Image (cartoon, helix red, strand yellow):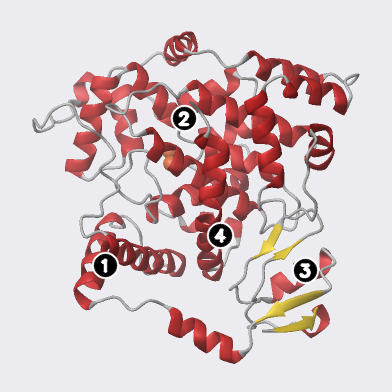
Amino acid sequence: MATIGIKEATPGLSLSRDVKDGSGHLLASSGQILTQKMIRIFKIWGIPELRIQDSADQDQAVEDEPLLPETIRLQAEAVTRHRFQYNDLNDPFSAELFRISCLKKGQRLMQNPEDSPQENLETETDRPPSPLDKTKVKKVNIDFLINKTLRLGSIPDIYYKTIAAINNPEASLDDIANIVSKDITLSAKVLQLVNSSFYSLRQKVDTLTWALALIGTNQLMTIVSGVSAVSLFKHIPSRLLNMVSFWEHSIACGTAARLLSGYFPERMDAERFFVAGLLHDIGRLILVQNLSREYLSLLQYVKKEERFLFAAETEKFGVDHSEIGARLAVHWNLPESLVSMLKHHHFPEYGRSFREAAIVNLADILVNALEIGNSGETLVPVIEPKVCQELGLDKEILQPVINEIEDRLEETFAIIYGTLE
Ligand SMILES: [Fe+2]
Ligand SMILES: [Fe+2]
């Protein structure tokens, strides 16, 4: 390992430590190979020096890549190829994601030969699924479903009070902190998040007012809405959906979206991406909660027919979970940009901002590919070439982003989900 000044940095060198800006936002991760574009971004953000690997470290890193037995490697590749069946593996970005996914699958198979996290449902029956009768599209009334959900469990009052205070120009940070502090769970989560590895603060933040001054009121609003949303759905029975697996998928997607947003020089509101990822599939919970029998048979159907669940939802209900989730976000008065990210996370080109929706889309695909949790899809959604083009991301970012998702998942999961009764 060696330290070099930013002026000595040249493309091709490998970082041995994360690079973060003054606020702790990740600019590049350990293991990433330097490009001209990255060096330019570091200069813009005033990064004085970098820690890089010397060639001996790099040789060691290659040697450290785990060697899998041939049978496991072949099994992992066959399963992963099946899950990637709609992706173009000639595309370098998709091919790299496929390579990493094969490796991860092989490692899991080594630990558990039965590894199959897609089996997250305890289905009601072993009967074969009936074919989807396209003549019987039952167009659901989204507002009816949402109102029913909101009657079953209401969003905590503290949510609306906090949003009102944030929108009140007269309210001070102390006033807002006083409202949040009335909810012990919520205030603990805000402090835990601010003190988590995402912010890399040098000192521990122990008061809400200080936390608010650091993260800003917009970020607080998104954290509060995310935490409130999780609590609203905590009573869905495991017979219908494995909630741990669902939130693992969602929290990992939020983490991935937050990390990906850090790759852009224009500073984006990182918490907004985290909450967009956290809530991106929340419409599915409304469908499962209100139309459980139909949804269970739809899950069996897509698995047997090797279809994407989001596409089958539209065939069955006339609408998919992204539309329903976005409408719920409107009910909660969430910002328009967040609503748009939820609504367009499967088809980002139709979003208010292609780039914002594309970040959530890519984050969802990464998490699906790596089988981190599960929200119902059995296949890896397609990485559209225009998504990579628009985002301008190189395939080299994949490994470090994936490493970061895995490193942070446990901590973030414990904060968002772990302490809910
Ligand atoms: Fe989705
Ligand atoms: Fe998803």
- Tell me the residue at 45%/34% (across/down): 281
Name the N-terminal-most of marks 1 and 3. Answer: 3
Q: Quadrant of residue 69?
A: bottom left
- Report the amino acid beneath label 2: Ile
- Tell me the residue at 50%/86% (across/down): 60
Name the N-terminal-most of marks 3 and 4. Answer: 3
Marks 2 and 4 sit apart, C-alpha to C-alpha, by: 24 Å
Instruction: Confirm or deny contact between disc 4 and disc 1 (CB under 8 A).
Output: no
Residue 176: image tag: none
In this view, the mark in front (4 or 1): 4
Q: Quadrant of residue 223?
A: top right
Q: Residue furthest left?
A: 127
- For label 3, count other residues whose C-alpha is less than 10 Å away and answer few (under 14), some (14-19) or many (20+): many
Name the quarter where the N terminus is drawn: bottom right
- Report the amino acid beneath label 4: Glu
- For label 2, count other residues whose C-alpha is less than 10 Å away and answer few (under 14), some (14-19) or many (20+): many
Instruction: Provide the residue designation for mark 2.
Output: 282
Instruction: Provide the residue designation for mark 4.
Output: 404
- Report the amino acid beneath label 1: Glu
Quarter of the rendered structure image containing ligand 1: top left
Residue 77: image tag: 1
At mark 3, the secondary structure is helix
